[in-house]
Amino acid sequence: MLCQSCEKRQATTHIKTILNGELKEYNLCPECAAKLGYGSFFGNFGLDIDKIFGSFMESFGNERSAKRCSFCGSSFEDIAKSGKVGCAHCYEEFNDKLLPSIQRIHGRTTHTGKLARSAGAEVKIKNEISRCRYELEEAIKTQEFEKAAQLRDKIRELEGNMNTAGGESK
Amino acid sequence: MSEVIKQRKDVSDVVISTRIRFARNMKDYPFPCRLNEEKKRKVASIVKEAALGGHSAISDRFKYIQMSELTQEEAVSLVERHLVSPEFISDRQGRGLLLLDDESVSIMINEEDHIRIQVIRPNMDLDGAYDLADKIDTLFDEQLNFAFDDKLGYLTQCPTNIGTGMRASLMLHLPALRESGAMGKISASLAKLGFVIRGMYGEGTDPKGSVYQLSNQVTLGISEKEAINNLRDIATQIITQERAAREAMAKNISVLDKIFRAYGILQYAKLLSNDECMKLLSDLRFGVEIGVFENIDFDTINHLMIEVQPATLMKNIGKKLNPHERDRIRAEVVRSALMRKQVPASRRLEE
């Protein structure tokens, strides 16, 4: 499909937008998409994020592995083609194949931040530690030294918990 | 930190609104792309139950809307008011929306993910918006089995959202930076930092009304708090640049001419197309921003920018209108809003 803006290059970006009260769909090439403000965080490469993700994974898809997710039935090919993961279990099932793309997109592969109720005990402590470390940095920056000292003590305590209890404590 | 907040001055001359969005999914159901309509309905009813049946005071304030039951105008108006995404109304089967009574919270069910919690606040209020989204998220977490991985965080249909699943955005009015042609450069350098800035209304190279949306892109390996603080830092820089550009333009007679013409047309026009109206409202806002008009407040203009959108216009009037009729009604809406403000063009900037 050709780009609807320049009518020259191949369209790779699909955009849904509201224009004068109507839902419009556009197919654009990466250049025009970037020009029109739909450049992604890979914009400086002149490529669209879905395309990177899709094509990157396609190279794996060529292996034609017959493996399917036991929960939702997605194959890795399905995921690579659509850029959409089928279910939570796919992330485990195709972990080794997904991880390089995830690394490419985010630059990192380990979550820090809010945890769901279902998160493991050890990760909960680790998370608390990294949260405290971040707050400690902030406290030092703003010269709130009393708060910083409290945070430092808390971090030590949490680290102690992790070493002795082996992550059993909550 | 508290020092920073204390020193934060009002930025409503640049920041129109703040938005925080969380993407969440349930572990025991495939993501929406792998659900048929029946399963989507099932997911929608579970999420609805979790929200409305909760013991929190906020539960009573939610209204559930089955998207397939809305008219096209009602659905499009939700997009114009930034309550749902364009994608959400492109196929409305099996999709549901939970809307808080004051419309500050909208929860999309079966958009790209099972649950999209979105909080919108006027002006710059990242912490306030985040706290509310966080609270609602925790309420869901208590009742639903979220798809979460110790290493990858919250799991989402698109891997670009995994980790925190959080997108924080600010809607910015940047007429001076746009006029000066700096937006391309800014957009490119933001991309390198993991942020994106794009036009808010319509498609054009010419973001209607010079309204832009600035948001974070990276969601894995960075905590919500860090992401929000980074966004605030970036926004602060953009605000400073925009204000500097405004100051440089404020004495330019051509710029002033444009602003006063916009004011004149908005007050007296009998027909206003959506495009023209957005452009003029943006010029008018620019005038307020540089202190040309007294008595017009940002809220009035912010509201007008949404009220004049076609579907919202028809929804408020309560009937379908053809484009010509819309242009007439739009002009009336704008005129009466400005009349109420009774704004004589006040003192000019010293020339």
Image (cartoon, rainbow, N blue to C red):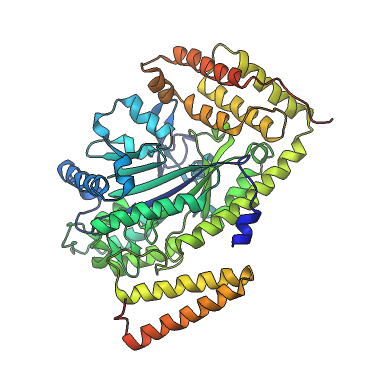
Does residue B53 appear anywhere in the picture?
A: yes
Residue found 29% across the figure and 42% down from its top: B60
- The picture places residue A114, in percent across and down from the top left corner, at 39, 63
The one of B348 and A52 positioned closer to us in this rendering: B348
| Residue at image point 40% right, 72% down | A127
In this rendered view, identify the residue nearer to me: B338 or B43. Answer: B338
Q: In the rendered image, which quarter is residue A35 located in?
A: top right
Q: Is residue B193 above or below residue B103?
A: below
Residue visible at 23% across and 47% down?
B53
**Residue at 55% of width from left, 36% of height from top?**
B205
Name above or below for residue B250 compared with residue B49: above
Residue B50 picture location, percent across and down:
24, 49
Q: Nearer the viewer, residue B81 or B60?
A: B60
Q: Residue B253's image quarter?
A: top right
- Residue B145 locus on image (x, y percent): 23, 59
Asked whether residue A40 appears in the rendered view, the answer is: no
